[in-house]
Image: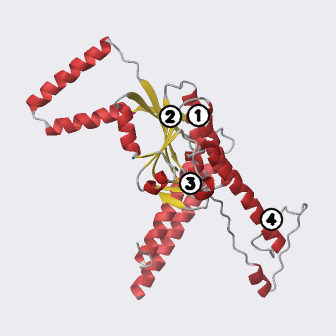
Amino acid sequence: MEFLAEYASFLAKTATLVIAILIVLSAIAGLRGKGRRKGSGQLQVNKLNEFYKDLRERLEGSLLDKAQLKVLRKQQAKAQKQQKKKPEEKRRVFVLDFDGDIKASATESLRHEITAVLSLATAQDEVVLRLESGGGMVHSYGLAASQLARIRQAGVPLTVCIDKVAASGGYMMACIGDKIVSAPFAILGSIGVVAQLPNVNRLLKKHDVDFEVFTAGEYKRTVTVFGENTEKGREKFQEDLDITHQLFKDFVSRYRPQLHIDEVATGEVWLGVAALNKQLVDQLMTSDEYLSQCAAQANLYHLHFAERKSLQERVGLAASGTIEKTLLGLWSKLGQWRV
């Protein structure tokens, strides 16, 4: 036990030193970057057909002998030559990704990707969004959903593929799709609104600490963390939640009129198989299967708008990652971490 205590002390000192160094580096980076204009970023475009072709050719090279491979390559070369003589006009499929956190931070890249797509896409093309999100802030996901609505308004078919989860704000985005494709065990739904906060007012009173809130406007503050919450404030807070929930239900109903909205807008979630029965999704299939099918008939382009991060932001990301790894390592060494 003495050894563990000493080792824990050593790790704690090391973690403190690392964190202190990273804070100093972040501050220096902030001073260097002050006043500099942040770069706008760059749109990266990759043709996914080449990716699928490479996968197939690598497998063919491993499974076929030299004679078989030679015959196959001749056939492919002949077909490619004929295709060049009579070029086939293929439709285009633009593939986007959205990996949502609580603030829907990926919206910043999504908005630029959609702007780029809409500058070229027509009604004969298609946009496929691979969506993963458990939801988050109402206003953040409202903006993300509004970006997707631009695609619908432009008359470009939109397919949303969900492999793992599209719940709450994630489903708010997914419902905009002309077609929703879900993996059989993806999590969907959670059409509801939740808000929670602690209240330590009684603890403050117990230690003779006064906390006063001054407002101009009857409902500028309804419930607080430190102040004494009133029944009237709680009722107003609940009323605001109910209004937001109704707006959420109306939004989903607008894009998925086939839903029995009161049946599915209970805050519950369903796995893909059950979600299909409730018409929350249109088809059970992974995004890989859907895109590989598209690749046989269309040209697939994956778009990603990469934001240019400042030196301060890069240092901050490195610091957060290092701190997380250090703390996880500390807890695991002490035997307090279990999976």
- Identify which residue is drawn at 60% across, 44% down: 257
- Identify which residue is drawn at 39% across, 40% down: 290
- Amino acid beneath label 2: Val
> Camera-side residue: 6 or 231?
231
Residue 235 appears in the picture as rendered = yes
**Residue 127, labelled with which disc?**
2
How far from the left and from the top, in percent, is residue 193? 66, 60
Alpha carbon separation for disc pair 2 and 4: 41 Å
Alpha carbon separation for disc pair 4 and 1: 36 Å
- Amino acid beneath label 1: Ile
Q: Which residue carries the number 1 mark?
A: 151
Asked whether disc 4 touches disc 1, contact meaning CB atoms under 8 Å apart, the reply is no
Asked whether disc 1 touches disc 3, contact meaning CB atoms under 8 Å apart, the reply is no
Alpha carbon separation for disc pair 1 and 2: 8 Å
- Identify which residue is drawn at 77% across, 79% down: 201
Q: Residues within 10 Å of mark 4 (few under 14, many from 20)?
A: some
Of mark 1 and mark 3, the one earlier in the sequence is: 3
Q: Secondary structure at mark 4?
A: helix
Q: Is residue 98 above or below residue 218?
A: above
Name the image quarter holding residue 76: top left
Asked whether disc 1 touches disc 2, contact meaning CB atoms under 8 Å apart, the reply is yes
Of mark 4 and mark 1, the one earlier in the sequence is: 1
Question: Nearer the viewer's eye, disc 1 or disc 3?
Answer: 1
Q: Which residue carries the number 3 mark?
A: 101
Q: Secondary structure at mark 3?
A: loop
Asked whether disc 2 touches disc 4, contact meaning CB atoms under 8 Å apart, the reply is no
Alpha carbon separation for disc pair 1 and 3: 22 Å
